[in-house]
Image (spheres, helix red, strand yellow):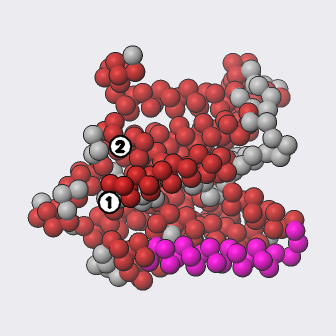
């Protein structure tokens, strides 16, 4: 039945249906179930009932941010894996995620975001861009993929060291707790203002990735062959890197560090698109949205004394998968 459904609507159609169902479930499910139809009717009619307020100010922004951030992480993961021709690649390789996290923690440490909340996402986006520029300067314009990866690892290590220093110098245990919880990744207490701050940079990154699918397909034949067919590998490389820094930086700025979506989702969906990097971009975006929406629903229904962070849940799912992928790649190499 599953194969018949796939043949009829295709994997993008099926994933779109899954995302829609999860989005609706995200609006309805929580610590206290929400009568969705009544809440929606009250909100559209201008009613100030409790259910309408919960839907419009809590559940809807949370679901929309999960939808957009998950799509960015999945899309950028697929783009990085296609560019580097490596299923172990992830958006964090270019340092954008760690750069965004460091600048966000920096703002939280000095308490600037308390008086102006909009500074936090903007600082994180600036951090993502600066991290990408550092990778560019360290690697050079015509750097090989290996050099770019090493430069990204160096920037990641530098940003992680900076975050560790801030945590060590935090003035109180409460400040340490706030900084640590932010880095775990979370979508609670987000508003529509956070979504509007996130969207421009996110959409700019998405637009940069339009049209790169065919070039990524050609790149699978090797850089020399792709170059002979009209593809400029260096230009493609930096186009993808800038797109990833914009979209992932905006996601990290809004929801914190949520790992493994950009790694797991493209790898799981690759067989359904015949291992074509170009076709993988759209389905990975849909799959990323589905995974983050599902994880956000999971943290609400899993009974815990303290609220579970969504980044922790994705790590619990993604880390074993990552280890299995490494073992599988090692066996294939041997």
Secondary element under disc 1, as helix, strand or loop, is loop
**202 left or right of 278?**
right
Q: Main secondary structure of the magenta part?
A: helix
Circle 2 crowding by C-alpha within 10 Å: few under 14, some 14–19, many from 20? some
- Residue 254, image x, y percentages: 63, 55
The Cα atoms of the two marked residues, 1 and 2, are separated by 23 Å
Question: Of label 1 and label 2, which has the lower sequence position?
Answer: 2
User: Above or below — where is 228 with respect to 53?
Assistant: below
Viewer-nearest residue: 157 or 40: 157
Secondary element under disc 2, as helix, strand or loop, is helix
Where, quadrant-wise, is the N terminus in this rendering? top left
**Magenta stretch: includes residue 155:** yes
Q: Which residue carries the number 2 mark? A: 270
Residue shown at 48% from the left, 50% from the top: 324
- Residue 26, image x, y percentages: 65, 32
**307 left or right of 238?**
right
Does residue 7 appear in the picture of this structure?
yes
Task: Give the residues in magenta.
Answer: 151-173
Residue shown at 43% from the left, 76% from the top: 150
Q: Which residue carries the number 1 mark? A: 334
Q: Which dot, 1 or 2, sits closer to the camera? A: 1
Query: Quarter of the image holding residue 16?
Result: top left
- Residue 124, image x, y percentages: 61, 66
User: Above or below — where is 38 with respect to 183?
Assistant: above
Q: How many marks?
A: 2
Query: Quarter of the image holding residue 2?
Result: top left
Where, quadrant-wise, is the C terminus in this rendering? bottom left
Residue shown at 69% from the left, 18% from the top: 37
């Amino acid at each position: 039945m599953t194969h018949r459904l796939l043949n009829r609507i295709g994997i993008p159609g099926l994933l779109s249906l899954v995302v829609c169902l999860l989005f609706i479930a995200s609006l309805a499910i929580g610590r206290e179930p929400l009568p969705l139809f009544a809440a929606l009717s009250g909100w559209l009619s201008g009613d100030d009932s409790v259910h309408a307020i919960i839907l419009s100010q809590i559940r809807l922004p949370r679901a929309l941010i999960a939808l957009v951030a998950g799509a960015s992480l999945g899309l950028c993961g697929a783009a990085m894996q296609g560019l580097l021709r490596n299923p172990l690649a992830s958006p964090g390789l270019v340092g954008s995620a760690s750069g965004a996290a460091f600048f966000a923690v920096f703002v939280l440490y000095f308490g600037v975001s308390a008086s102006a909340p909009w500074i936090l996402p903007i600082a994180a986006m600036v951090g993502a861009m600066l991290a990408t520029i550092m990778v560019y300067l360290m690697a050079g314009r015509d750097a090989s993929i290996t050099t770019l990866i090493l430069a990204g690892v160096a920037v990641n290590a530098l940003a992680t060291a900076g975050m560790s220093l801030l945590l060590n110098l935090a003035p109180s245990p409460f400040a340490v707790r706030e900084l640590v919880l932010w880095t775990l990744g979370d979508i609670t207490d987000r508003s529509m203002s956070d979504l509007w701050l996130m969207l421009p940079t996110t959409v700019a990154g998405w637009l940069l990735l339009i049209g790169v699918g065919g070039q990524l397909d050609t790149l699978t034949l090797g850089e020399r062959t792709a170059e002979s067919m009209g593809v400029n590998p260096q230009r493609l490389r930096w186009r993808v890197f800038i797109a990833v820094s914009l979209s992932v930086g905006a996601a990290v700025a809004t929801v914190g560090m949520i790992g493994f979506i950009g790694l797991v989702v493209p790898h799981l969906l690759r067989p359904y698109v015949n291992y074509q990097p170009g076709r993988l971009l759209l389905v990975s975006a849909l799959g990323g949205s589905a995974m983050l929406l599902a994880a956000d629903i999971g943290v609400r229904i899993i009974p815990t004394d303290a609220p579970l962070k969504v980044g922790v849940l994705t790590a619990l799912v993604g880390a074993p998968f990552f280890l299995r992928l490494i073992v599988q790649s090692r066996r294939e190499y041997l």
